[in-house]
Amino acid sequence: MFRAIRNTWQSEFFKNIATLISGTSFAQAFSIIIYIVLSRIFTEEDFGVFGLYMNILNITLIFSTAKYELAILLPKSDRESVNLLGLSGMISVGVSFVLLVIVVFFNDLICRLLGSEEISTWLYFIPLSTLLVGLFTSLRNYSNREKRYKLIAGANIGQSLSNSLLKLGLGLVIVGAAGLIYGVVFGQLVGFLIFLAVHVRVNRGKAGGLQFSEMKRLGKQYSLFPKYNMWQGLINNLSGALPVFLFSSFFSMATAGFYTFGYMILYRPVSLLANAFYQVMFQRFVEKQHHESSILPEVLLFIRRTIQVLLIPFIVIGIFAPEIFGFVFGEKWIEAGKYAQIILPWIFMVSLVMPLSFIPDLYRKQRVAMIIDGVKLMGRLAGLMVGVMMENVYIGLGLYSLSSTLMILYSLLWYIRLVRNNLPGDGSGSTLKENDG
């Protein structure tokens, strides 16, 4: 068994992951270098506004495709996947138009609810960002289905480099959060155009297979994704946005900025690497499910290897985070290092769970996943509100991190149990056609 696992790790599976990681690692290393400069150009208030923008975007993104982009990998038929891609794109256009109408007519109300007048202008960019990222993720998932990992890596690099370079250039000539937000929108545009250019050239003939009746049929067939995954994503992203929303409202925009900076420095490299594993593992495990092969050995191997690789670096960062932030980014960011220190256990658990978060989709257990994230939202909100009532940001963030860590650990154990209970040939497993009800 161990020889089989070792051979698997040295096979096409690992080569595909290595292709994605090599691209994301380069992009991430470059962006970290850029952030050393950006931390000296932009203020904590600027990062607070930027954090508010990104967290609003994270919420609107949930509706951008109704989560049908996750279903693109599941069908055996490529024709069905193409129509799911078309369905996701149509939904992205429609949702972005609705968001534009909402922003135009309710801009003042949204600003009052968020407790920030600074975000007013930038709300008009939310529909565009929502459209670009919705199309980007849909094309990325279809590229994943086709195993175009060099294309995915190239799009990630293009997005990250263009984002970072424009932030740097504009930061030198424009005051405020404008450089940060213009940079991220430009990066989103570049990433989408890279995917679009390749797919127009390579898959142009497949566009003839797009049929509205087929999209409608597939929309019903994969209705669990908008029914559960979309609302699960909304719950999860809303709970992730709580610190920025509450810190900017009850403490200060600077507090929200310190948290945003600390969170981004920790989460961005973890997210990029975890997404690389997610994309390859999702595609591979769907194939194994179609061939009724067990995915349990690779799931357990991934968890064990990830703990072995990341545990010591995370412990070191956990001990010295304020000193590291002060040395690398400047003394004014020591406070961001303290926030990073508090949320580190949660980020560590994210590195284990995010690459495996497709497992409920394989077995149609989205409803249970949504309930777990709902409990996590309540725990996070309760923890932050304790900090608000005590007027102590450290207590609130500490309780937020603790509840997040415990609930994500529970999710990981549940994923393992799901895989064990659905081993091929044991007569008890779900299939890709089972409905969770």
Image (tube, rainbow, N blue to C red):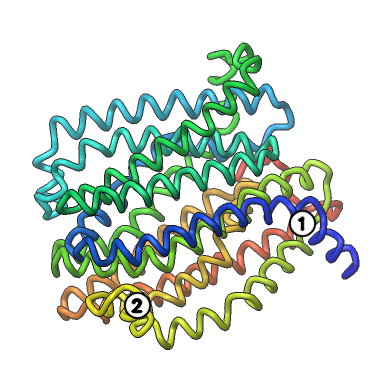
| Kind of residue sitting beneath label 1 | Ile
Which element type, helix, strand or loop, lies under badge 2? helix
Residue 411 x, y percent position in the rendering: 55, 65
* Among numbered discs 1 and 2, the one appearing first in the sequence: 1
Closer mark to the observer between disc 1 and disc 2: 2
Q: Residue at x 79, y 47 (%)?
A: 288
Q: Residues within 10 Å of mark 1 (few under 14, many from 20)?
A: some
Q: Quadrant of residue 84?
A: top right
Kindly identify which residue carries mark 2: 325
Residue 373 x, y percent position in the rendering: 44, 59
Nearer-the-camera pick, 232 or 155: 155
User: For the N terminus, which image quadrant?
Assistant: bottom right
Q: Is residue 271 above or below residue 80?
A: below
Q: Residue at x 57, y 21 (%)?
A: 200
Does residue 359 appear in the picture of this structure? yes
Q: Residue at x 74, y 53 (%)?
A: 15
Q: Quadrant of residue 328?
A: bottom left
Question: How much space separates mark 1 and mark 2, taking CA atoms?
Answer: 40 Å
Does residue 220 appear in the picture of this structure? no
Q: Is residue 250 above or below residue 122?
A: below
Furthest residue toward bottom: 319
Kindly identify which residue carries mark 1: 295
Q: Residue at x 19, y 34 (%)?
A: 103
Residue 3 x, y percent position in the rendering: 90, 67
Residue 243 x, y percent position in the rendering: 27, 65
- Judge left or right: residue 433 versus residue 7: left
User: For the C terminus, which image quadrant?
Assistant: top right
- Judge left or right: residue 274 versus residue 167: right
Nearer-the-camera pick, 393 or 180: 180
| Kind of residue sitting beneath label 2 | Phe
Q: Is residue 101 above or below residue 416?
A: above
